Amino acid sequence: MSEKACTSCHYITKDNVCSRCKATNFSEDFSGLVIMFDPETSAIAKAMNIKEKGRYALKVR
């Protein structure tokens, strides 16, 4: 099973339902990877609207 990115919140997962936003729309065509450890103090997290730790795609097609 390959990893896919949620088209709504860009969270990367292998599941069929996004554990972050509960969406079911995914894409296997994504690029870039952000691993968020401390979203409260990260400027990147603010720009991407990330509020939880995890792995996120920069661009989802």
Image (tube, grey):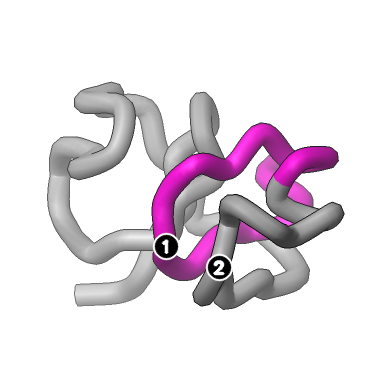
In the rendered image, residue 59 lying in the magenta stretch gets the answer: yes
Q: What residue would you read off at disc 1?
A: 53
Q: Tag 2's secondary structure?
A: loop
Residue 19 in the image: above or below residue 42: above
In the rendered image, residue 55 lying in the magenta stretch gets the answer: yes
In terms of sequence position, does the residue under pointer 1 or pointer 2 come before the other?
Answer: 2
Report x, y in % for residue 14: 23, 64
Residue shown at the point (81%, 56%) measured from the top left: 44
Q: What residue would you read off at disc 2?
A: 38
> Would you say the residues marked 1 and 2 are in contact, meaning their CB atoms lie under 8 Å apart?
yes
**The magenta segment:** 46-61
As drawn, is 49 to the left or to the right of 39?
right
Residue shown at the point (42%, 50%) measured from the top left: 52
Amino acid type, label 2: Asp
Q: How far apart are marks 1 and 2 (CA)?
A: 7 Å
Quarter that holds the C terminus: top right
